Image: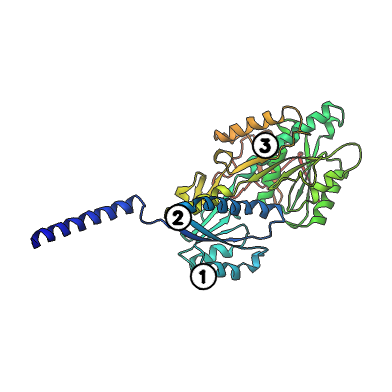
Amino acid sequence: MKRVYLITAATCLVILSVLLCCFKILNLNGGKDHLKIGFIYDNDESTPYTYNFSLAVDALEKKYAADKKDGKTVDIVTRSNVLDEEMEEPLRELASKESEGCDIIFFNGYSELVMKLAADYPDVQFCQTSYMDMSGKTVPDNYHTFKGEAYQGRYVTGIAAGMKIRQMISEGTIKEDQALAGFVAAFPTSEVISGYTAFILGVRSVVPSARMLVRYTGTWSSYNLEKAAARLLIDEGCVVISQHTDTIGPALACEEASGTGPVYFVGYNQSRSDVAPGTSLVTSRICWEQYVLAAVDALMSNKSIEKALSGHGRINGSDVSAGFDNGWVEIDDLNAQIMAPGTREAMDKAIEQFKKGKIDFVFKGDYTGINPDDPSDVCDLNKGYIENENTSYPLFHYILKDIVTIIE
């Protein structure tokens, strides 16, 4: 009888071992039912960039409130208005087991400290919005970068602006040589230059004679400087204004413009129809929710973050980008009251191209781009340029000759 019991026990142990192995292979025993998630913002939710990023927190709360029935929950901790040079203390506070003990932390700032300090906390995943060219970079296994391919949204909103300008020309509001767009920009980084170049190329796909004036503010967020720059652009004849800065200043400048005709506003990160209902035309945004939800879900399932993503452009296995094709970029709040006829159809046509993976038509044409920091560095766009080809951070940094004018 003892022999039977021993054989039965041994058989059960073998079966249990096999099942455990199967569970491990199928990833059924490595998942988690609770995560603590940290967010560090470079500003607060009152600014468009951080507001747009904070929508990922809303998406997490909604998803895991619904998932409680499945036993999965999250705790979310946020730190706002963290300057790059002040990053270390809040980062260590969120990562340290003696303090908040987060399992994963998301950052929308530009501090290099995130990459450097990730190695100190190998059990915590650090996910930072891409802030530099990651090609060839060696990073800790727990450090990740990501960004939506913003140039796609910029190009499509440029089409909307071009359609409006063409309508203004056809109605006699402006003459063809007055097809002038303006752009309020923070700094001459490649991210900013790539965005406004894609925007004017979208405009020119509709109005080939269109040109653009750019004014830099020297700061990411200053209501007074941004509004003043927009007003100057309007005084210089711009009939459409867009921005890569972080306040409502440019939108209000358009709404308050007085003169021969209206000046239309094209937004980024957050719709401005609330403060500029008569002139806010359309907005593009990066959908950070796509990455954040996938990364958290991967950690819940004990999977690699990158393998759980639907993005592309993976560099060193930890840098990911995507555009309209994977829902990482979207168009928001197209104003049906003021858009030109046919605008939605023209935008949808371009978006469909992006969704099919056809991206080589944006930075292409009979244009010469010149590096503002090195005039000998010239880019011939007859050959085309593929943005985000090797890194999630945009690298196009050329000023289009005779098309884009920088006003000092």
Please state which of residues 270 and 318 is positioned toward the viewer in this rendering: 270
Q: Residues within 10 Å of mark 2 (few under 14, many from 20)?
A: few
Which amino acid type is marked by label 3? Answer: Val
The image shows residue 85 at horizontal and vertical percentages of 65, 67
Mark 1 secondary-structure assignment: loop
Mark 2 secondary-structure assignment: loop
Mark 3 secondary-structure assignment: helix
The image shows residue 11 at horizontal and vertical percentages of 17, 55
Please state which of residues 231 and 25 is positioned toward the viewer in this rendering: 25
Residue 317 visible, this angle = no
Q: Looking at the figure, which quarter contains the N terminus?
A: bottom left
Left or right: 61 with respect to 248?
left
The image shows residue 332 at horizontal and vertical percentages of 68, 41
Q: Residues within 10 Å of mark 3 (few under 14, many from 20)?
A: many
Query: Do the residues bearing badges 3 and 1 touch, measured as CB atoms within 8 Å?
Result: no
Which amino acid type is marked by label 1? Answer: Ser
Which amino acid type is marked by label 2? Answer: Gly
Query: Which residue lies under the disc numbered 1?
Result: 96
The disc label shown at residue 156, or none: 3
Residue at point 56%, 53% (across, down): 60
Left or right: 2 with respect to 311?
left
Sequence-wise, the earlier of marks 2 and 1 is 2
Query: Which residue lies under the disc numbered 2?
Result: 71
Residue 114 visible, this angle = yes
Q: Residues within 10 Å of mark 1 (few under 14, many from 20)?
A: some
Disc nearest the viewer among 2 and 1? 2
Report how far apart the C-alphas of labels 2 and 1 lie in the structure: 25 Å
Q: Which of the 4 quarters of the picture holds residue 357?
A: top right
Query: What residue occupies the far bottom of the structure in this picture?
Result: 98
The image shows residue 226 at horizontal and vertical percentages of 80, 53
Report how far apart the C-alphas of labels 2 and 3 lie in the structure: 42 Å
Residue at point 50%, 44% (across, down): 310
